[in-house]
Amino acid sequence: MSNECHHEVIIIGGGLAGLSCAVQLANSGVHSLILEATDRVGGRVRSDVINGFTLDVGFQVLLTAYPSCQKLLDYSALRLRYFDPGALIRQSGTFTELADPWRNPGKAWATATNPVGSIADKLRIWRLRSKTCRGSLAELYERPHKTTEQYLRDFGFSERMLDQFFRPFIGGVFLDESLSVSSRMLEFVFRMFSMGGIAVPADGMAAIPRQLAERLPRGSVNLQTSVVQIEGNRVVLADGSSLTAKHIVVATESNAAARLLELPEIQTSWNETTTLYYSSPQCDEKHKSLILRGDESGPIQTATIISNVAEEYAPPKSSLISVSLNSNDATSSDENALLTKQQLSKWFGDQVNRWELLQTYQIPYGLPDMDIDPVIRSPVVEERENTYLCGDHCETPSIEGAMDSGMRAAASILKR
Ligand SMILES: Cc1cc2nc3c(=O)[nH]c(=O)nc-3n(C[C@H](O)[C@H](O)[C@H](O)COP(=O)(O)OP(=O)(O)OC[C@H]3O[C@@H](n4cnc5c(N)ncnc54)[C@H](O)[C@@H]3O)c2cc1C
């Protein structure tokens, strides 16, 4: 069955890449239709509300320095809630603060002399920060690169600093503690952490795609509409019907794009993650920090009392704790939950007996495991006329990578 409806632009996938492309086109007066397979926009940026608690599907944060977010998002309407800069590191059975001396000069000496790495390591962190903030992002992506592990070793960081800070930190960001990710990505992330705040919207991370979708004219998004094939300027839907368009944008995750475009070279493997949420009658901890596992063994990679950062995430007189696990841990989910609770008890004491497990999210498709040789992929698909590609796999596996690639796909269409 063929549907005669012809569109200017069809965008396959309503994640941040597809939405950013649509918003950028709409800003230039070009109408597009998003076809999204699931029942909501946002793709991997989702939030659920359970018993009055807002649970992001996998712990995620917005780095406010992301350039495309600064261009496309209205931060004040998102009512951003900020983490304390720096991090708390679990070290020798206690928490040690690794503060950001640029934003918190009063803590510079305490941070320099704390047991997380040597004083020389702290100086190297400050040197790394200066290096990553120099020049433009485009220049950063052009720099010679190697694995993050090699880069940090060549920078002179001690093994202790690699294990206690960089592995849980980069593991939390790229869902891979092996530090095999390209040093360009490390530089990109360090730059973003250094140049802006770490935040979540008061209504959960899903407020970000929602804000983008609300900017589009009514009828711009067809939910529960899965595309199974692209034939020239025609897209075939799962129900057998088809739509045609002058321009087709494939804004799905890497492997769906590889299938639709018959481009096996863009296929990726995936880094996975697990996030557990606990509810508590008001937690005794008052900090708004990201906690890294430091030198401790156990399933936990990072944790946050997320309702201290955004009180709207929990109903009145209660707290919400978000815990992300080391994805390499192969134990069963029941065993993980038990070990996690034991480790939390070591960290936070008897109050943990009152914490209840609200939800566990096991996310097998977290981030595309990007090649050590990442390239900023052109949005124009060669050998297919008027077909474009975007998504986090085209740049960095991040909110910024997804949104910027969507904006670049829109720019290519507008240029034509
Ligand atoms: C647990 C987790 C934590 C993260 N933490 C952070 C973080 O802290 N900071 C950060 O910057 N980034 C983080 N990220 C990464 C960031 O969320 C992603 O890089 C970004 O959302 C990817 O957006 P996208 O539009 O490229 O892809 P997706 O969000 O995957 O969107 C693709 C869309 O295409 C749809 N689709 C697929 N196939 C079809 C089809 N055949 N027909 C129609 N629709 C289709 C899908 O349903 C989906 O909605 C995290 C990701 C996860 C999962």
Image: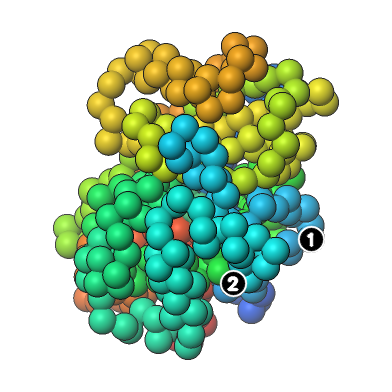
Which residue does the image show at 29% across and 70% down from the upper left?
156
Residue 130 picture location, percent across and down: 49, 79
Disc ID at residue 144: none
Quarter of the picture containing the N terminus is top left
Quarter of the picture containing the C terminus is bottom left
How many marks do you count on the picture? 2
Marked residue nearer the N-terminal end (1 or 2): 1
Q: Is residue 204 left or right of residue 130?
A: right
Residue 136 picture location, percent across and down: 48, 86
Residue 341 picture location, percent across and down: 48, 18
Which residue does the image show at 34% across and 61% down from the upper left?
393
Q: Secondary structure at mark 1?
A: helix
Q: Nearer the viewer, residue 4 or 164?
A: 164
Which residue does the image show at 66% across and 51% down from the upper left?
83
Q: Nearer the viewer, residue 245 or 226?
A: 226
Q: Is residue 9 left or right of residue 30?
A: left
Distance from disc 1 to disc 2, alpha carbons, whole Å, reads 18 Å
Which residue does the image show at 45% across and 58% down from the upper left?
398
The residue under label 2 is 195
Mark 2 is surrounded, within 10 Å at the Cα level, by few (under 14), some (14 to 19) or many (20 or more) other residues, namely: some
Residue ranking furthest to the right: 316
Q: Is residue 139 left or right of residue 313?
A: left
Q: Secondary structure at mark 2?
A: helix
Residue 382 picture location, percent across and down: 25, 76
Q: Nearer the viewer, residue 37 or 377?
A: 377
Q: Is residue 153 left or right of residue 204?
A: left
Asked whether the viewer can see residue 314, the reply is yes
The amino acid type found where label 2 is placed reads Met
Q: Is residue 294 above or below residue 413?
A: above
Queried on whether the Cβ of the residue with tag 1 lies below 8 angstroms from ligand 1, the answer reads: no
The residue under label 1 is 76
